[in-house]
Image (tube, rainbow, N blue to C red):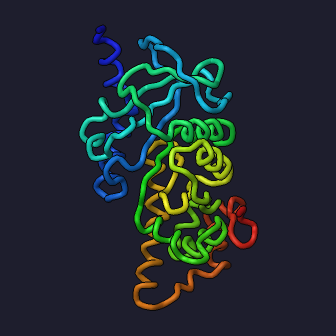
Amino acid sequence: MNPIPNTIFAELPALSDFRDTAHWLAFRGWSEAAGGNMSVRGIVPKGFAETSYQPLPLQVPELAGMALLLTGSGTRAREIGIDPVPHVGLYKIGADAKSYCWLAGNAKPTMELAAHCAIHNQLEAVRPDDKAIVHTHPASLIALCHLDGFDSAQNISKKILCLQSEAWLHLPEGVGFVEQQLPGSLALGLASAKAMRQHRLVLWQYHGLLASGTSLAHAVDLMEVFEKAAQVYWQIRNVGIEPAGICEQETRNTLQAFGQLDRYAGGDSLPE
């Protein structure tokens, strides 16, 4: 086996983002066992030979000829955080936009490969700077799905983001929501891609959280903002009080001061 491609792969700058992000997710307890996955798209690096192409269950024209760095099936965040090389794979999307091949690293992609492809295809079209996707399982956010009234993007965003003064500032478009779907299914990926048109964060009912960002670290930044607001919600609820939240006008004043009001999806304008 030619060791040169393996050496090139191990030195890819994006792998350090996988390592650091995975370590943090494991530390926070958001990626239990093999839960969660991450990916980054980009230009195919030089020095890698193509292998046989495998079919994708959907066509992703925006990704034709592009590369995906993707966590492998069954890989653990706590192990990726130590050494990402055996746990992250490099793949190329075929020129036909409906197939992929393995180039280096882990050769068994996450079961949510189709979902990642669908979402990246959408992001490349509407937010090309968002090249990273993180999916993980924060307990405080999954728990919200078991309460009445937390079953739409509008309700979740209005009830949670108003509890911390900077939450809407980081997430002016609000948080998307996808009803329960079979994990790893194409249906989940397509629904998530649709939600990602407007939102950088999407809550998967009873499952976990999905985020896009300019890097994996940036995607986790947004997750932390939402999760902190959810912690505030639970702490208030735990003393027997229903959170009132920051008033709409104060939220608008803050967004106006930071030039974000035109992106605000509060009130009645937030998509379901």
Q: How many marks?
A: 0
Image location (x, y in percent) of residue 46: 45, 14
Examine the image and state in which quarter residue 272 appears.
bottom right
Apparent side of residue 250 relative to residue 270 in the rendered image (left or right): left
* Above or below, 33 relative to 53: below
Q: Quadrant of the N terminus?
A: top left
* Above or below, 36 relative to 251: above
Q: Nearer the viewer, residue 216 or 2?
A: 2
Q: Nearer the viewer, residue 205 or 3?
A: 205
Most distant residue in the front direction? 182
Q: Nearer the viewer, residue 272 or 248?
A: 272
Determine the residue positioned at 38% across, 30% down: 13
Determine the residue positioned at 49% across, 56% down: 209
Image location (x, y in percent) of residue 140: 42, 68
Apparent side of residue 151 relative to residue 140 in the rendered image (left or right): right
Examine the image and state in which quarter residue 261 appears.
bottom right
Apparent side of residue 217 relative to residue 202 in the rendered image (left or right): left
Determine the residue positioned at 31% across, 25% down: 10
Most distant residue in the top direction? 2
Image location (x, y in percent) of residue 262: 72, 60
Determine the residue positioned at 50% across, 73% down: 164
Most distant residue in the right direction? 269
Most distant residue in the left direction? 82
Image location (x, y in percent) of residue 19: 32, 40
* Above or below, 174 relative to 92: below
